Amino acid sequence: MDLELKDHVAVVTGGASGIGKACAEALEREGCRVAVWDLANGVDVADYASVHAALARTVAEFGPVRHLVHAAAMGSGKFGFPFTNLEPADWKRVLEVNILGMVHVAQALSPAMVERKSGSMVFIASIAGQIGSQTDPPYSASKAANINFAQCLAKDMAPHGVRVNTVNPGMVKTPLNENVWRAWNAQQPTDRQKSYADWGLEKVRAVAPLGRWQSPADIADMVVFLSSARAEQVTGQTINVDGGQVMHW
Ligand SMILES: NC(=O)c1ccc[n+]([C@@H]2O[C@H](COP(=O)([O-])OP(=O)(O)OC[C@H]3O[C@@H](n4cnc5c(N)ncnc54)[C@H](O)[C@@H]3O)[C@@H](O)[C@H]2O)c1
């Protein structure tokens, strides 16, 4: 299948680790020139000036951006069940990074895509945004906001030939996911504590019909497809790559 991505310029936020890194590598394998915007290389998506500076550097080095994959996000780092375990102040940075970060990136990249009358954006949200995951309410609420804003964007951008979709992973072994286990484990009495491997396997077997972890590459496959010419009629969709954990009809 020719995905027609060769020599296209793509931005991957959060591309230094986990799912974002797998997306950046997969796009590169398809011939894209990929700019990674990540805290690890000095770009903070929560800071609009930082996003603008990154865009100027990317355009100068690679040319106009045709594809966005937005994977940068964070959790609160605390176990949020019940939600009163968290202070209201624990929500602030999560909402700034996860919601405003998306707004900043979309706002910065949209005008040139509209002008060129083409482009694609894929936002990595989470099934937590669909099911009200109690583990980390600010994370969960921010992911619902990602799904919703992506739908607004898809409607706005469709008349300009720009497609916008969302991919929701379920359980993927990454530093972000390991932090969820760490916060959970720290709350347990010693005799109920588990290793990350045992916690994850038990959880994924209990919640996902396919019964196994998704890999970063599983998510990247869907992201690359949605970015490609083979998905030319796909916009405004929220696609779960979650082993069947969430099913809608
Ligand atoms: N791992 C999972 O099980 C899982 C499940 C559902 C959704 N997701 C989503 O997948 C995406 C990627 O997460 P991951 O699991 O690969 O995590 P990760 O921790 O491996 O990677 C996240 C990356 O985002 C970067 N980042 C964080 N804050 C940033 C900021 N303010 N500005 C720029 N970069 C920033 C980090 O430096 C890191 O490189 C996130 O949107 C996450 O919510 C992950």
Image (tube, rainbow, N blue to C red):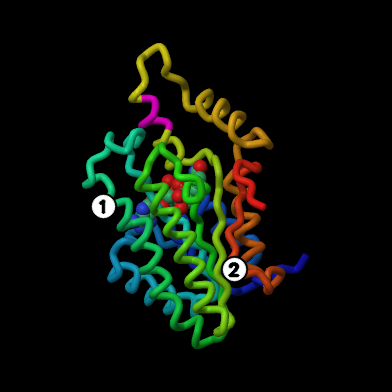
In the image, taking residue 236 as reference, residue 36 lies left or right, namely left
Q: Position of residue 205 (x, y in %)?
A: 61, 29
Residue type for callout 1:
Lys
The answer to whether residue 127 is above or below residue 27 is above
In the image, taking residue 12 as reference, residue 249 lies left or right, namely right
Farthest residue to the bottom: give it.
115
Select label 1 or label 2 by which is in front: 1
Residue type for callout 2:
Cys
Counting labels gives 2
Magenta residues, start to end: 181-185
| Real-space CA distance between mark 1 and mark 2, rounded to the nearest whole angstrom | 35 Å
Q: Secondary structure at mark 1?
A: helix
Q: Residue at x 49, y 54 (%)?
A: 125
- Answer yes or no: disc 2 within 8 Å of ligand 1: no
- Answer yes or no: disc 1 within 8 Å of ligand 1: no
Residue 18 visible in the displayed image: no
Residue 150 visible in the displayed image: yes
Which numbered disc flags the more N-terminal residue, 1 or 2?
A: 2
Residue 32 got which mark?
2
Which residue in the protein does label 1 denote?
92
In the image, taking residue 231 as reference, residue 50 lies left or right, namely left
Q: Position of residue 90 (x, y in %)?
A: 25, 45
> Closer to the camera, 138 or 109?
138
Q: Position of residue 247 (x, y in %)?
A: 64, 47
In the image, taking residue 184 as reference, residue 118 lies left or right, namely right
Residue 127 got which mark?
none
Give the crowd class for mark 1: few <14, some 14-19, many >=20 residues within 10 Å: few
The answer to whether residue 18 is above or below residue 7 is above
Give the crowd class for mark 2: few <14, some 14-19, many >=20 residues within 10 Å: many
Q: Secondary structure at mark 2?
A: loop
Q: Position of residue 211 (x, y in %)?
A: 65, 33
